[in-house]
């Protein structure tokens, strides 16, 4: 499914026209040190981007691929999780975009590395609380094993039952019965992958900003398979910023190379980052024999 059909970032002429209007009160904001995202793509000659079910923005650090996704997300009013650091000129910039799209489904959203990091941090905080409770419960187990606890009234029932369990159970079983398991028994990478599988539903547009962060090579391949299935079977459209060779190889993806001026669609096998990997492994081919 294709919901987003075309998107055109403000051209150099649009930016110059905006700042040439000295009478516009918006241009009296001289106290601001940055006019981001104005001037980021001033000399990049960005084309009108056309989209397929999977479209990828590829480029090195500083190529602007994340900025493009964030501008698109704000222009389309997509839902987001983590707060995005915007300048005072951001609304002025996105007002200059041009776009063609079908009605954007309600569940559509942008998912950034900050969203994934926030989820991992939340899990860590929960687990630290569980670990603290585990220590307290272990101390209680030791105490209950060596003391009697009379049941005087129904108000004492929960404490009496815990005491009886301590008398009859092993330490490991006692902890399992009285303490929820750690929310996070997986690695950060496995939790990050789970975050994507939980957040991406059916029949919606998703913008993914460098989703390979925190993922091992094996997990990147799993994410690739999940994303391909989401497009093929569940009506999703994906726009991704990445330099991961695994995600760049997604079936049917249209890839814009932002390291070129102007950016042009290129096969993933011709991209510099992919060829660096290829050359490295070819150089060490004998060591794999």
Image (cartoon, rainbow, N blue to C red):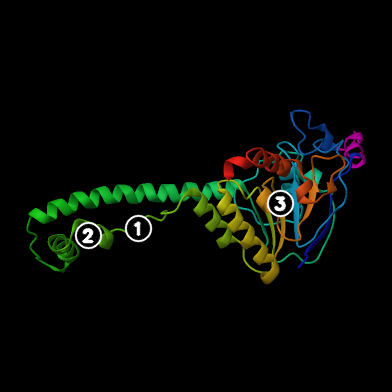
User: Between disc 1 and disc 2, whose residue precedes?
Assistant: 2
Q: Please state which of the two labelled residues, at mark 1 or mark 3, is closer to the viewer.
A: 3
Disc 2 on helix, strand or loop?
A: helix
Q: Is residue 288 visible?
A: yes
Q: Which mark is residue 14?
A: none
Residue at 8%, 54% in the rendered image: 146
**Looking at the picture, how far across and down is residue 135, in whole percent?**
26, 48
Marks 3/2: CA distance? Answer: 49 Å
Answer few, some or many: residues within 10 Å of disc 3's Cα (few below 14, many 20 plus, some between 14 and 19): many
Residue 191 at x, y = what percent? 50, 54
84 drawn magenta: no
Compared with residue 63, is residue 146 higher up or lower down, i.e. above or below? below
Task: Check if residue 22 falls in the magenta segment.
Answer: yes
* Disc 1 to disc 2: CB gap under 8 Å: no
Q: Quadrant of the C terminus?
A: top right
Q: Residue 224 location in percent, x, y?
A: 64, 57
Looking at the image, tell me whether mark 3 or mark 2 is earlier in sequence order: 2
Q: Is residue 107 visible?
A: no
Work out which quarter of the rendered image holds the N terminus and state it: bottom right
Query: Residues in magenta?
Result: 13-24
Query: Would you say the magenta stretch is mainly helix, strand or loop?
Result: helix
Q: Which mark is residue 248?
A: 3
- Whether tag 1 and tag 3 are in contact, CB under 8 A, the answer is no
Which residue was labeled with disc 1?
181
Q: Which mark is residue 174?
A: 2
Q: Quadrant of residue 27?
A: top right
Q: How many marks?
A: 3
């Amino acid at each position: 499914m294709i919901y987003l059909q075309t998107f055109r970032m403000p051209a150099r002429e649009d930016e110059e026209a905006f700042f040439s209007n000295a009478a516009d009160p918006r241009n009296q904001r001289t106290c601001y040190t940055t006019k981001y995202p104005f001037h980021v793509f001033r000399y990049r000659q960005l084309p009108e981007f056309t989209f397929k079910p999977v479209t990828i923005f590829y480029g090195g650090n500083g190529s602007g691929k994340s900025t493009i996704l964030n501008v698109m997300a704000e222009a389309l009013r997509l839902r987001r999780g983590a707060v995005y650091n915007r300048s005072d000129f951001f609304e002025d910039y996105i007002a200059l975009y041009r776009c063609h799209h079908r009605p954007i489904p309600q569940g559509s959203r942008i998912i950034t590395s900050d969203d994934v990091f926030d989820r991992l941090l939340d899990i860590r905080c929960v687990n630290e609380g569980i670990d603290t409770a585990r220590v307290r419960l272990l101390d209680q187990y030791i105490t209950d094993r060596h003391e009697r606890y009379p049941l005087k009234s129904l108000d004492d029932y929960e404490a009496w039952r815990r005491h009886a369990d301590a008398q009859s159970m092993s330490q490991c079983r006692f902890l399992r019965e009285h303490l929820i398991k750690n929310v996070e028994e997986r690695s950060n990478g496995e939790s990050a992958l789970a975050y994507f599988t939980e957040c991406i539903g059916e029949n919606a547009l998703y913008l993914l900003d460098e989703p390979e962060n925190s993922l091992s090579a094996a997990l990147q391949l799993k994410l690739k398979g999940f994303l391909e299935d989401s497009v093929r079977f569940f009506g999703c459209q994906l726009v991704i910023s990445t330099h991961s060779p695994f995600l760049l190889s997604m079936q049917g993806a249209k890839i814009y190379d932002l390291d070129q001026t102007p950016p042009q669609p290129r096969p993933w096998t011709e991209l510099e980052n992919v060829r660096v990997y290829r050359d490295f492994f070819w150089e060490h081919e004998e060591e794999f024999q």
